[in-house]
Image (cartoon, rainbow, N blue to C red):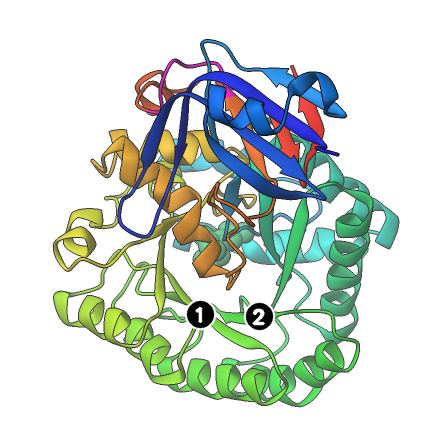
Amino acid sequence: MTDLVVHDAAQVATPTVDSDLETIRDGAVAIEDSVVVAVGPTDEVVREHPPENATAAIDASGKTVLPGFVDSHTHAMFAGDRADEFTAKLRGATYQDILTEGGGILRTVRATREASHEQLVENLLGHLDVMLAHGTTTVEVKSGYGLDVETEVKMLEAIAEADERHSMDVVPTFMGAHAVPKDTDADAYVDRVIEEQIPAVAADDLAEFCDVFCEAGVFSVEHSRRILKAGREHGLKPKIHADEFERLGGAQVAAEVGATSADHLLQSTAEDITALGDADVTPVLLPGTAFALATEYADAKAFEAANIPVAIATDFNPNCFSQSMEFAIDLACNGMRMSPASAIRSATATAAEAIDRTDGTGTLREDSPGDLVVADVPDYEHLPYNFGVQNVQTVVKRGEVVRRD
Ligand code: NIG
Ligand code: FE
């Protein structure tokens, strides 16, 4: 029996192989055993899958159905917040000033070390609820506020428990190389990441990816290369924070080690963009971070000109405190000047590539996971056009309605 039929939608929109978004007017989606079994015009879909015979049905009249959003870059596992730093930044302090004074990441490290496993799980579950309300059905979450083996493992264990307890799929990334802890220098700390943290994380199968903050004053190109290669030897797929404030060459490292994604890329050159494309590394742009730091946005148009699809993600963290993929899509359009169709593709199908989900996640076609959102807009263009509000009303994960406004 059909588990769920969403019918009479003003529009169903999904990325396809050939287009950013293909649209169906008066569309419907049927889901069985948690996967999509039919997508098409309502009259055709309901002939085969009558809503009255399905376990559940949603009348989406006047609304738009899209694949669930994939947030492929977050630091959602942390304790405390840094609202006062937000105010300090508005008075003129820079992100780097705050970090040098022991604030920023290092302050969140202190709070996260002190937090219990249960507190960390509860914090993350709260953030996942907000993400879900804004349409995210799959999210990547990094560790990286531990910077010692105990806390990094504690964070990843808390991520695993939150994944089990929440309807959203949570993809764990180990990011021990997020900052250099106060008691040591970068060279010595990289040794600890490689010798202690990566083996411990891999031994308990706690992460799928290994990420590193390749940045001036943090980890060099050589540090990043060593860490990502060591991670790969332990079965962790590489990801990298590259070329955010300075162009150190992180994008080139991503290409060299065959990273799944390279993220931020604000300073990347045409040569870097080509290297990422040639090596099949998915670029991830994070417009919320630029917005929160009031800096320039990454050059989405340069990637588009090179014909390389990008993912967009929230980068949710204590410095960029937005869990909303709806807002990331708004900023991709209003800040980076992406078209609504490519912004939505970047938040769905391409975002799934950035976390190596190749089972159709981020699309609505036969056999893709039954993850979708119903937004209270007449077509997809209205989603970023009507920015700064919650357009997502209903969220379906694996065929189950997990959120309804
Ligand atoms: O992606 N760049 C490094 N990490 C985060 C910021 C984390 C923080 O400030 O707590 C980022 O922007
Ligand atoms: Fe980040």
Does dot 2 land on a helix, a strand or a loop? strand
Q: CA distance from mark 1 to mark 2?
A: 9 Å
Expressed as whole percent of the image width and height from the top left, the position of residue 157 reads 79, 62
Residue on which the image places disc 2? 209
Q: Residue furthest front?
A: 47
Q: Regarding mark 1 in the picture, which secondary structure is present there?
A: loop
Picture layout, residue 21 above or below residue 243 = above
Image point (44%, 59%), residue name: 353
Mark 1 highlights which residue? 260
User: Quadrant of the rendered structure where residue 201 is?
Assistant: bottom right
- Image quarter hosting the N terminus: top right
Instruction: Count residues near mark 2 (Cα–Cα under 10 Å), then give few for <14, some for 14-19, many for 20+.
Output: many
The residue stretch that appears in magenta = 375-380
Q: Amino acid at mark 1?
A: Thr
Q: Mark number for residue 145?
A: none
Mark 1 or mark 2: whose residue is earlier in sequence:
2
Residues at badges 1 and 2 in contact (C-beta under 8 Å)?
yes
